[in-house]
């Protein structure tokens, strides 16, 4: 049993085991003959050992669970080829469709819970910003700076959606949907005053943009744009490239190397 200060409510309480990747997700990412591959910019492991630690109190775990995890997780793409979230998205005609990009307005689709998506997305980024999750001790996965507190307050229902940030959601459709998870990391941004963070989970890629000049990015923000836009595009190659780039620098585990060698044609 662990006691300590819960970083979400800031109270000294009994802490429960929290997961960076919600536990249920492991079942979606796991093929019958293998364990899920977890790739990060720091380390690459194939393991069913979940990244969990005593972090939050059970009330705050419940905030994240009820806030978005419970609604979204059963709708993610699975190894069996199901993708309930995309099925719901496609129940309504898109705002516009080009051969390689479809833009959906979730505001016109009552089956899409934008509030749950936003809470889930920001919840993952926030969890990565307050703990090392066993990858590199004493170093959080990402650093949100002053926005960490703003995102925490939003998640807890104490504050509105923070100014200066935008959350974007891309959905990567079958048949190329990657059934995997890429934990939150900071990417390269084109401008000095812009910071970009990403994570990918079984068909959905969330991007968090932070800037004092957020400007146009708000027009594609899932939360701030009143049509609540969701973009559907085959981004599997882009995600694979990110995986490969990360894998180059990641410390590959012995077990994963064996697995990869076994899979070579
Ligand atoms: Zn708490």
Image (spheres, rainbow, N blue to C red):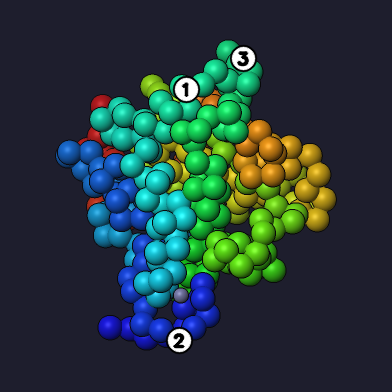
- Examine the rendered structure and indicate whether residue 46 appears above or below residue 55: above
Residue drawn at x 25%, y 54% as measured from the top left: 48
Mark nearer the N terminus (3 vs 1)? 1
Question: Residue 251 versus residue 47: which sits nearer the camera?
Answer: 47
Q: Tell me the mark number nearer the camera, choosing from 3 and 1.
A: 1
- Examine the rendered structure and indicate whether residue 130 appears above or below residue 191: below
Q: Which residue is mark 3?
A: 98
Left or right relative to 263: residue 196 = right
Left or right relative to 53: residue 122 = right
Q: Which mark is residue 12?
A: 2
Q: Where is residue 254? Give x, y as percent.
A: 27, 55
Distance Cα–Cα, label 2 vs label 3: 52 Å
Does mark 3 have its CB less than 8 Å from ligand 1?
Answer: no
Residue drawn at x 50%, y 41% as measured from the top left: 113
Answer few, some or many: residues within 10 Å of disc 3's Cα (few below 14, many 20 plus, some between 14 and 19): few
Q: Where is residue 203? Give x, y as percent.
A: 43, 35
Distance Cα–Cα, label 2 vs label 1: 45 Å
Q: Secondary structure at mark 3?
A: strand
Q: Which residue is mark 1?
A: 90
Q: Residue furthest left?
A: 33
**Quadrant holding the N terminus:** bottom left
Q: Where is residue 207? Give x, y as percent.
A: 60, 45
Residue drawn at x 60%, y 16% as measured from the top left: 97
Residue drawn at x 41%, y 44% as measured from the top left: 72
Question: Residue 244 versus residue 14: which sits nearer the camera?
Answer: 14
Answer few, some or many: residues within 10 Å of disc 1's Cα (few below 14, many 20 plus, some between 14 and 19): few
Answer few, some or many: residues within 10 Å of disc 2's Cα (few below 14, many 20 plus, some between 14 and 19): few
Mark nearer the N terminus (2 vs 3)? 2
Question: Residue 246 versus residue 197: which sits nearer the camera?
Answer: 197
Q: Secondary structure at mark 2?
A: strand
Does mark 1 have its CB less than 8 Å from ligand 1?
Answer: no
Can residue 184 be seen here? The reply is no
């Amino acid at each position: 049993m662990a006691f300590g200060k819960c970083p979400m409510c800031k109270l000294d309480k009994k802490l429960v085991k929290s997961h960076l990747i919600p536990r249920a997700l492991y079942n979606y990412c796991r093929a019958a003959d293998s364990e899920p591959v977890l790739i990060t910019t720091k380390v690459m492991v194939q393991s069913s050992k979940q990244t969990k630690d005593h972090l939050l109190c059970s009330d705050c775990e419940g905030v994240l669970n009820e806030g978005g995890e419970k609604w979204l997780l059963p709708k993610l793409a699975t190894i069996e080829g199901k993708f309930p979230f995309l099925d719901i998205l496609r129940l309504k005609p898109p705002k516009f469709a080009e051969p390689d990009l479809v833009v959906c307005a979730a505001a016109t689709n009552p089956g899409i819970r934008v509030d749950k998506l936003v809470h889930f997305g920001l919840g993952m980024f926030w969890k990565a910003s307050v703990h090392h999750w066993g990858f590199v001790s004493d170093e959080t996965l990402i650093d949100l700076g002053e926005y960490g507190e703003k995102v925490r307050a939003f998640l807890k229902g104490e504050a509105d959606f923070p100014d200066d940030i935008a959350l974007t959601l891309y959905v990567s459709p079958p048949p190329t949907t990657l059934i995997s998870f890429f934990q939150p990391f900071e990417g390269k941004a084109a401008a000095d005053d812009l910071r970009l963070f990403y994570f990918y989970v079984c068909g959905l890629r969330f991007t968090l943009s932070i800037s004092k000049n957020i400007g146009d990015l708000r027009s594609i923000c899932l939360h701030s744009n009143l049509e609540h836009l969701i973009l559907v595009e085959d981004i599997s190659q882009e995600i694979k490239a990110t995986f490969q780039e990360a894998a180059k620098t990641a410390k590959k585990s012995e077990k994963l190397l064996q697995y990869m060698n076994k899979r070579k044609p």
